[in-house]
Amino acid sequence: MIDIHCHILPHLDDGAQTFEESYNMAKQAINEGITAIIATPHYQEKYRNDKEKIVGEAYRLNERLQAEDFPLTIHPGQEVRIFGEVLQEWQEGKIQTLADTNYMFIEFPSNHVPKYTEKLFYDMQLEGLIPIIVHPERNQQLIEQPELLYFLVKKGALTQVTAGSLVGHFGKNVKKFTQQIIEANLTHFIASDAHNTTTRPFHFNKAIDTLDKLYGTDIVYLFTENAELLLNGENVMKEMPEKIKRKRVFGLF
C-alpha cells in the first residue's frame, strides 16, 4: 500500500524530530503493509520547508533505510498551507508537488476556508495542477457548510481524508463527518497524516478494515488504487460527487 501523506522526514516540522523517530515510523509503516510513503512536510509560515530541502532530506532518509534493507521507499511531497502566492512560489521552484506529479496538497486553516480558494484552484488547474484538499473532515467551516466541499469537488478539486479520523482518533464528530464525506463521494484518498508512532500514528490497517466493514471491498480498492495512480502521475478514479444530506431533527434541518 501507498501512504500519500506522512510527516516522516526528520527535524523539518511537527513530525519526526530525529532520524531515530523516522526509523521507528518506517518500521511501523512496514508493519501496516505500507511499501511507499510520500513525505509531506508542512509549507507554511512556521515551517518554510522548500522543495530543495525536502528532496534532499527524502534522499538521505532513503539512503539510510536502504542500508538497513527496509522494504520502504520515500518520495518527496509537501503539505502547503493555502496562501495567495501558491502558484508564484511553485513557479519559483519552492513548492514540491506530490512525488513530482501534477498533484499538490493544499491545507486549509482549521476553522475556515479562505474566500479566494475557488479562484486559486481554478488558476492552479489552468496551469495543469490538481489541488488535493487535505483532511477536509477537520475543517470547522466545511463541517458546518458541507455544500462548500461539494462545490469545490464539483469544480475539480480532490480531497484526502485521514485514517485516524475514520477510526475516531479525532473524536465522534470528525468520525461522523468523515463517513459522510466518503458516502457522498467527496473524497478520493485515505492517508495516515502520521506524525509519530505514539500520539499521531498511522492507523492505516484499522482504517482499511473499517472501510471494508462499512462500505465493502470496492471502496477499499478505489482508495488504494488511487494512491498508486497518483504516485505514477496518472488520472485517479472519481465517482459522481453528491451533496451531504442534512438529517432532520424535530422536523427541522
Image (cartoon, rainbow, N blue to C red):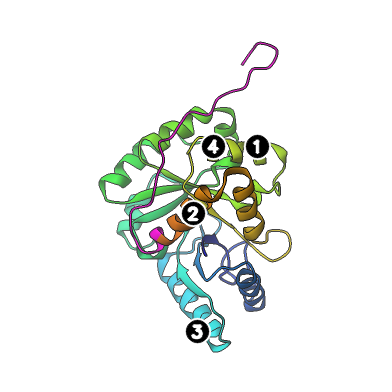
Comparing labels 4 and 1, the label whose residue is closer to the camera: 4
Q: Earlier in the sequence, mark 3 or mark 4?
A: 3
At 59% across and 51% down in the image, what residue appears? Answer: 162
Vertical position of residue 222 compared to residue 20: above or below? above
Whether 251 is among the magenta residues is: yes
Q: State the mark number for residue 183.
A: 4
Q: Residues within 10 Å of mark 2 (few under 14, many from 20)?
A: few
Whole-number angstrom distance, CA of label 2 to CA of label 3:
31 Å
Range shown magenta: 229-253
Q: Position of residue 251 (x, y in %)?
A: 66, 10
Q: Position of residue 103 (x, y in %)?
A: 38, 55
- Badge 2 is on which residue? 221
Q: Label 3's element? A: helix
Comparing labels 1 and 3, the label whose residue is closer to the camera: 1
Of residue 94 and residue 164, the one placed in the foreground of this image is: 164
- Badge 1 is on which residue? 176
- Badge 3 is on which residue? 63
Amino acid type, residue under disc 1 in the picture? Lys
